[in-house]
């Protein structure tokens, strides 16, 4: 079975795929100080709950936009699952060209979303990921990654608004019934929700005009269903797009070999 680890700025998602489907998907808050042993205590408990054993894991793959977390996640795979993880990088075989000026600067999650979205929905398309940042990634007919847009994420905007304006409270995210708020909280909720709907619609309109081709719109991320309610531009929702991208990347690339002398490898991390 394949252990998939997607380490984002907000959450680390671990999942196990048995070749037919996901046996379990679990999340823990991202903390770059969390050790491999702490990850293991958490993950092994969840595996046991799903009637899985560490020896069931035969391969592992990691995608991360948090470099400081990579060392401990690698140690998790090596020490607890006897597996040298494949780490998602632009230099791997993605099965498509990366048509940007500096491929090594593109976040692994964006390439993984492009890989999975094109495999499932075809192209050309744009993937909107409602994560810590809200990203828009454009994929060509042949699956080639051609660039995109990075905007502040919804939760970041809410937190910034609360911290920068002394009298504005911290609010939750929801779809308000009216655009015009008649008190502070509804007004803030409207600004966040409909403001981001406007951001999505405006950027997709401009991306389509600049790209010059009809583009399908696929959304992923935990908030994708909520924001899809407010616009007809989002045509498909896939909350597990990044995990599927990691699975597909592992299928395309050979498994790294775990050397007998693990200490040498660990020292070079």
Image (tube, rainbow, N blue to C red):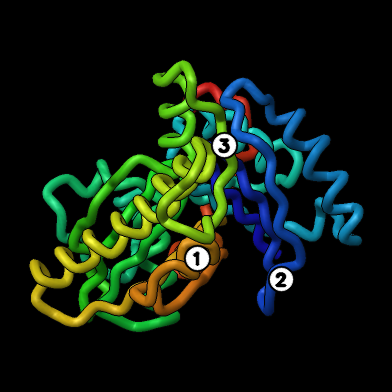
Please say whether residue 248 is visible from this viewpoint: yes
Residue at the far top in the pictured view: 166
| Residue placed under numbered mark 2 in the picture | 18
Q: Is residue 174 above or below residue 201?
A: above
User: Dot 3: within a 10 Å radius of its alpha carbon, few (fewer than 14), some, or many (20 or more) residues?
Assistant: some
Q: Residue at x 46, y 16 (%)?
A: 166
Q: Quadrant of residue 141?
A: bottom left
Q: Is residue 56 above or below residue 63?
A: below
Q: CB atoms at circles 3 and 2 under 8 Å apart?
A: no
Query: Which marked residue is nearer to the observer: mark 1 or mark 2?
Result: 1
Q: So how many labels did they put on this image?
A: 3
The answer for how far apart the CA atoms under marks 1 and 3 are is 28 Å
The answer for how far apart the CA atoms under marks 3 and 2 are is 40 Å
| Residue placed under numbered mark 3 in the picture | 171
- Secondary structure under tag 2 reads loop
Looking at the rendering, in which quadrant would you find the N terminus? bottom right
Rendered location of residue 14, percent (x, y): 66, 50
User: Dot 1: within a 10 Å radius of its alpha carbon, few (fewer than 14), some, or many (20 or more) residues?
Assistant: many
- Secondary structure under tag 1 reads helix
In this view, the residue in front, 78 or 240, is 240
Rendered location of residue 72, percent (x, y): 61, 30
Give the mark, 1 or 2, whose residue is nearer the N terminus. 2
Q: Residue at x 23, y 56 (%)?
A: 148
Rendered location of residue 132, percent (x, y): 46, 42
| Residue placed under numbered mark 1 in the picture | 241
In this view, the residue in front, 212 or 46, is 212
């Amino acid at each position: 079975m394949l252990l998939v680890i997607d380490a984002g700025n907000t959450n680390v998602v671990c999942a196990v795929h048995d070749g037919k489907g996901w046996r379990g998907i679990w999340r823990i808050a991202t903390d770059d100080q969390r050790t491999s042993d702490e990850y293991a205590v958490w993950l092994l408990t969840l595996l046991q709950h799903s009637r899985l054993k560490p020896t069931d894991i035969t391969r592992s793959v990691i995608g991360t936009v948090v470099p400081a977390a990579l060392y401990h996640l690698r140690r998790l795979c090596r020490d607890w699952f006897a597996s040298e993880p494949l780490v998602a990088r632009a230099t791997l075989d993605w099965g498509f060209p990366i048509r940007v000026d500096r491929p090594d600067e593109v976040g692994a999650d964006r390439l993984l979303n492009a890989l999975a979205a094109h495999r499932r929905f075809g192209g050309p398309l744009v993937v909107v990921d409602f994560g810590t940042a809200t990203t828009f990634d454009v994929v060509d007919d042949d699956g080639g990654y051609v660039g995109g847009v990075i905007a502040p994420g919804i939760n970041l905007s809410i937190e910034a608004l609360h911290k920068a304006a002394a009298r504005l409270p911290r609010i939750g995210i929801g779809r308000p019934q009216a655009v015009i708020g008649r008190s502070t909280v509804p007004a803030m909720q409207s600004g966040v929700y409909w403001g981001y709907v406007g951001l999505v619609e405006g950027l997709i309109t401009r991306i389509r005009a600049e790209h010059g081709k009809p583009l399908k719109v696929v959304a992923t991320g935990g908030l994708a269903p909520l924001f899809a309610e407010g616009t007809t531009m989002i045509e498909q929702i896939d909350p597990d797009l990044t995990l599927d991208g990691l699975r597909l990347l592992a299928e395309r690339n050979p498994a790294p070999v775990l050397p007998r002398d693990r200490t040498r490898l660990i020292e070079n991390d």
